[in-house]
Image (cartoon, grey):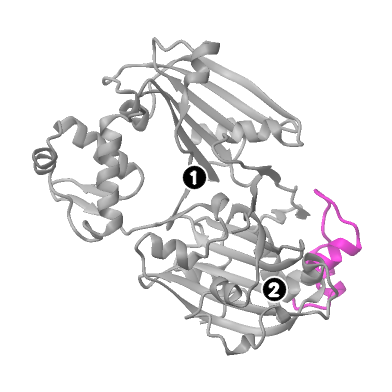
Amino acid sequence: METVPLFISFGNILKSKIETGEFTYGDKLPTEEELSKAYHMDRKTVRKAKKLLSDEGLIKSIRSKGTYICKPRVSFYPLNSNISSFTTLSLKQGFSPNSKVILAEKIKAGRKYAGIFKTDPDYPLYRILRIRKNNETSVAIEDTRIRYDLIPNIEKYDFSVHSLYDTMHAHGIKLSEISTKFDLQYPSSDIANALNIPACEGILKLEFSVYNQNGQLIEYTRFYSSSVKINITV
Amino acid sequence: MTKPLCGIQYELIDTIEEYIEENNLKENDKLPSERELSRLLNANRVTLREAISRMCKEQRLLSIQGKGTFIAPKKFEIVMQNSELFKECCLKSPYACDVKELYNKKTKPVDVVYLALDLSENETVPTALNVIYLNGEPISFERVYTRENFQINALESSALRRGRIKISISKATENEALILGVEPKCLVFVERTYGYFEDRIAECHISIINAARVSFLSREIESSK
């Protein structure tokens, strides 16, 4: 049986308490002595586990004041997305995700997206621009373009409430392959404002290309997220 | 609030891209001057400047003071697979990948490594620093800290169990910037993982990757349900 060093497994216990909300943002972590008594752990182990969590940005120790739980971050698995929507991912991690739709309109593909979707510039697409929030904090900007004729009567759906993937699923649209590209860049001022971050802070840009079973591109999304608000695991 | 990702600047960016395509401009080619471009594209100079600034932030263009604006070199696209280190993915990539050892000696490692390897204060640990080059360009370097007394031979290295790979984002320190040939405080990816042997951490692996030169790709096929 594989076991993991004690301070790591204890660290994971603390992490899960933070993730499930038992210890929430703004709370103070119990003191080292309290933790060591409660979990029958060596104080050294407790201290090492705390250092791990602090290193991951989950807690912050302030001299003579205590250790505070930091604002939670969504864990992102961009390479294992499994065609999961942001909504599903967030819910699974105990967040209350919601979105604000900035734009939802029928547009012409134009030269650039005609190339991406392999159609002509006059081809109709539907663009949905949303700010994705978790517990009222702006976490990401999502700029989605899908084929206009993909979902009948698409204008009637409010994508601040509905999940795009659930809607596709309900219409029997089967997603077959998702291709993801991600890299870091600096935000332009409008993105920085919308995400409430300074312009010198990096953002993660993800490009999702979603294909149906016929190998046709049906969705192309650009997703911009503040790099301090998410964790990435491969 | 102005809508993000909308507006004249973004349309102008498309126009600039068309211009680049039509004139077959390649990496490191120079764009016409701002004045010339605004005439050619029939665009307002202020809007043009903003559009160019955005493209620079997205690392599609490179502006050099006093010299002009150039097409930025394309980023290396590295396919990342589950549980494979960046270095391994680079070696499998279509680019010419070279790994060169910069040093292999005992050093005092960063905090996290102390904890992981259970070292006492001031203890040093065998450290290998390898630089990874793609097409001759230094893209990343890895520091591998190995527990003393742990000999990696053929049998044992296959017994080394790799934990999950965590990628975080940071800014390059002075030393890191020096090795990668970038400005300090440039955006970098930090890749961390542990190697376990018989339930203990035997190896700590920390890589710094120049975020300005690399894009990560992956392909996920949804199995039919």
Farthest residue, direction right: B23
The residue sitting at 43% across, 71% down in the picture is: A133
Q: Nearer the viewer, residue B171 or A43?
A: A43
**What's under tag 2, amino acid-wise?**
Tyr
Q: Is residue B49 left or right of residue B119?
A: right
In the image, residue B24 lies in the stretch drawn in magenta: yes
Give the residues drawn in magenta, as a range. B16-44
**What's under tag 1, amino acid-wise?**
Lys
Q: Is residue A193 above or below residue B122?
A: below
Q: Is residue A96 left or right of residue A31?
A: right
Q: Position of residue A5 (x, y in %)?
A: 30, 29
Q: Position of residue B110 (x, y in %)?
A: 38, 29
| Pointer 2 or 1: first along the chain | 2
Q: Residues within 10 Å of mark 2 (few under 14, many from 20)?
A: some
Mark 2 highlights which residue?
B10
In which chain is the residue bearing label 2?
Answer: B
The residue sitting at 35% across, 70% down in the picture is: A135
The residue sitting at 72% across, 62% down in the picture is: A213
Residue B46 in view (yes/no): no
Q: Is residue A27 above or below residue B27?
A: below
Q: Nearer the viewer, residue A118 or B76?
A: A118
Mark 1 highlights which residue?
B171
Residue B120, image quadrant: top left
Q: Residue A116: which numbered mark, if any?
A: none
